[in-house]
Amino acid sequence: MAERPSENDGSGGAASLAALSDLDALRDYIGDCHRCPLGDTRTTLVFGVGDPTARLMFVGEAPGRNEDLKGEPFVGAAGTLLDELLASIGLVRSEVYIANVLKCRPPGNRDPLSDEMASCTPFLAQQVRLIDPTVIATLGNWATKYMLGTERGITGLRGRLFRVNGRQIVPIFHPAAALYDRTKRDVLFEDFRRLRSVLDGSLESAEARLPSAHVPGSWRMQTSGEAADTEHDADTTAADADAGQQTLF
Ligand code: URA
């Protein structure tokens, strides 16, 4: 089995990762990755695609079967819906950047494991630093949990606007969740209209509000810490609130 160096061991590895100056160098650095066991089961490492200077970045969960075969994020049915959603706000894939929390497919599309997240997310963090988007749309639970440093689920976070390290974070349902659910599909299109408003700068103010048919309350600007403590879900803990304040990228 291949050696698995850690990015998070406090050694020089993390420092050299942060020093990488472009996406090609980052891709080279990641190499034929076996830092976690997913390296042994994947077909293709899915790095990310799009405009390396995009203002808008999407972060999904992990490659699925089609992505694993093709080496590109969101090329299956969820990707087709993502393309439709982009078109609905006048965008095409090449104008944004798309990446995932994990770069390799978990067998059977199971949820990411914490060791896999720990090995892989430093690469996503560096991708964010290099692309330097002003807006990040997190697709589904795992991307939202990582970007906001919360344990709260997407259902309670979508429809809100967060700011982390000067970037606007827009949590959105994962397109795969909407493939067979008309209600979620409608919510997704509505959230993309809101995303367009964020990009257009019309929701820059913390007081900015848009009415929503689906979310009681409104579209609100919040700090990431609020992701954990504004409502009282069973899965919300004080630790989540602390995690929400940490610097992720
Ligand atoms: N789902 C994801 O989260 N990412 C992909 O790339 C494909 C499906």
Image (cartoon, rainbow, N blue to C red):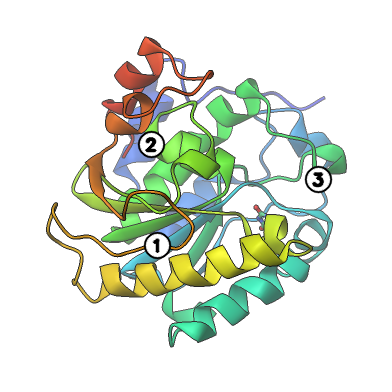
Lower sequence index among marks 1 and 2: 2
**Badge 2 is on which residue?**
148
**Badge 1 is on which residue?**
212
* Distance between mark 3 and mark 2 Cα atoms: 27 Å
C-beta proximity under 8 Å, tags 3 and 2: no
Instruction: Please tell me which residue is depicted at 81% across the width and 63% down the height of the picture.
Output: 66
Residue 34 in the image: state x and y as whole percent: 70, 33
Residue 35 in the image: state x and y as whole percent: 64, 29
Is residue 1 toward the left or the right of residue 203 in the image? right
Can residue 174 be spotted in the picture? yes
Question: Within the image, what quadrant is residue 71 found in?
Answer: bottom right
Q: Residue furthest top?
A: 238
Provide the secondary structure element on which disc 2 rests: helix
Provide the secondary structure element on which disc 1 rests: loop
Question: Within the image, what quadrant is residue 10 found in?
Answer: top left
State whether residue 52 is above or below residue 143.
Answer: below
Q: Closer to the camera, 132 or 43?
A: 132
- Quadrant placement of the N terminus: top right
Is residue 19 toward the left or the right of residue 36 in the image? left
- Crowd around label 1: few <14 · some 14–19 · many ≥20 (10 Å): some
Q: Quadrant of ligand 1?
A: bottom right
Lower sequence index among marks 3 and 1: 3
* Distance between mark 1 and mark 2 Cα atoms: 22 Å
Q: Give the foreground label among 3 and 2.
A: 2
Can residue 73 be spotted in the picture? no
Instruction: Please tell me which residue is depicted at 28% across the width and 64% down the height of the picture.
Output: 210
Q: Closer to the camera, 141 or 214?
A: 214
Tag of residue 42: 3
